[in-house]
Image (spheres, rainbow, N blue to C red):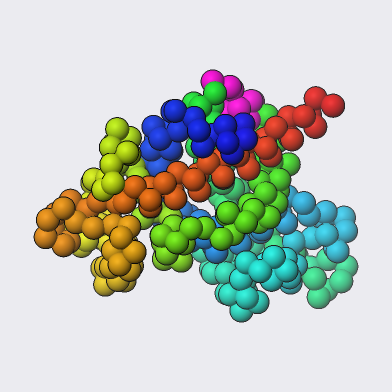
């Protein structure tokens, strides 16, 4: 399905809400793994690293995944600075999402390896999005993927290529962008959307399930002060507000902010579907 197919689908709102709820549940099961993908920059860096992993060639040290190659690709695509990319690698090593492999013939080359536990959140993320696509058109992408798990090695790099080259992904709209730079900002938006009734989507001010900034911050494991500051910025844009006393009543999100989220999901789903179609086409050629 193209972006236009997805964005105009009458079932999109309900399907995206179900996807947001699945993302929320994944965060509750494994907050640390989910946080790797929870800002736009970290999400893109994670996909760059995963693509390098799947495209590596252990028989050719020039095609191995190394910290230097990761940093070079990240900077080349203007996803992050060298210092930020290096810090991301160190953090991933600290939490055992990345391991340093044995040196090859050239002792200076230290390849990076991804343990199986690192791929589990990725596989879950792909399952969620294929399930959403299937719910839109009744196809059986998820069933195909589960029957052919080896597809992952070809599918993820194609998804990464699509995300990194997409202007709407790289330059999201204003309120969406505001949250993508917040720690766990992706989780914040998923939680808000998961609590929206799709039948309310046409309202100018759409009620959410947020009643208390403190409780919301605690669940997200965020600083209350930091979250409140971001929400105040979003209030200034007219993207969120409160039906009663600020911070102690039902929070609403604007029709425009909701639309930004839906648009971002449609763009991402179209990229994933194009990558999936390319994989299945290659398999049948």
Is 223 situated left or right of 186 in this image? left
Where does the image place residue 32, in percent across and percent down from the top left?
Answer: 44, 58
Residue ID at (59%, 59%) = 170
Relative to 2, does residue 204 appear above or below in the rendering? below
Q: Viewed as shown, does residue 119 lie left or right of 185?
A: right
Can residue 22 be seen here? The reply is no
Q: Quadrant of the C terminus?
A: top right
Front-most of 41 and 92? 41
Location of the N terminus by quadrant is top right
**In this rendering, is residue 84 above or below 63?**
below
Q: Residue at x 54, y 23 (%)?
A: 137
**Residue 145 located within the stretch drawn in magenta:** yes
Image quarter for residue 202? Answer: top left
Check the image and name the residue furthest to the bottom: 83
Q: Position of residue 30 (x, y in %)?
A: 42, 51
Total label count?
A: 0
Q: Is residue 228 magenta?
A: no
Q: Residue at x 54, y 34 (%)?
A: 6
Give 257 or 27, whichever is nearer the viewer: 257
Residue 265 in percent (x, y) is at: 50, 44
What range of the chain is rendered magenta? 138-147
What secondary structure prevails in the magenta region? helix
Q: Is residue 251 visible?
A: yes
Residue sitting farthest toward the top = 138
Left-right relation of 277 to 222: right
Q: Position of residue 160 (x, y in %)?
A: 66, 51
In the image, taking residue 72 as reference, residue 231 lies left or right, namely left
**From what the image shows, is residue 153 above or below residue 188?**
above
Q: Name which residue lies at 80% across and 25% down.
A: 284
The answer to whether residue 209 is above or below residue 91 is above
């Amino acid at each position: 399905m193209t972006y236009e197919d997805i964005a105009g689908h009458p079932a999109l709102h309900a399907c995206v809400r179900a996807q947001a709820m699945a993302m929320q549940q994944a965060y509750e099961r494994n907050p640390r793994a989910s946080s790797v993908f929870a800002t736009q920059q970290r999400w893109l860096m994670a996909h760059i690293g995963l693509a390098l992993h799947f495209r590596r060639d252990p028989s050719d040290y020039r095609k191995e995944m190394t910290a230097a190659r990761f940093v070079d690709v990240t900077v080349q695509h203007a996803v992050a600075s060298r210092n930020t990319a290096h810090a991301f690698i160190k953090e991933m090593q600290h939490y055992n999402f990345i391991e340093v492999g044995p040196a090859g013939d050239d002792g200076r080359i230290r390849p990076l390896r991804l343990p199986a536990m690192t791929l589990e959140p990725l596989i879950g993320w792909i399952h969620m999005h294929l399930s959403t696509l299937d719910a839109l058109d009744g196809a059986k992408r998820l069933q195909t993927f589960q029957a052919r798990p080896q597809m992952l090695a070809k599918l993820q790099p194609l998804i990464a290529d699509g995300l990194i080259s997409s202007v709407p992904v790289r330059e999201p709209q204003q309120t969406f962008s505001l949250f993508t730079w917040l720690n766990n900002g992706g989780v914040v938006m998923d939680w808000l959307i998961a609590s929206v009734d799709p039948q309310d989507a046409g309202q100018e001010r759409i009620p959410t399930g947020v009643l208390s900034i403190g409780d919301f911050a605690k669940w997200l494991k965020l600083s209350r002060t930091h979250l409140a500051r971001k929400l105040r910025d979003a209030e200034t844009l007219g993207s969120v507000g409160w039906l009663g006393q600020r911070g102690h009543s039902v929070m609403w999100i604007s029709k425009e902010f909701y639309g930004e989220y839906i648009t971002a999901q449609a763009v991402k789903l179209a990229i994933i579907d194009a990558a999936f179609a390319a994989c299945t086409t290659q398999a049948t050629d």
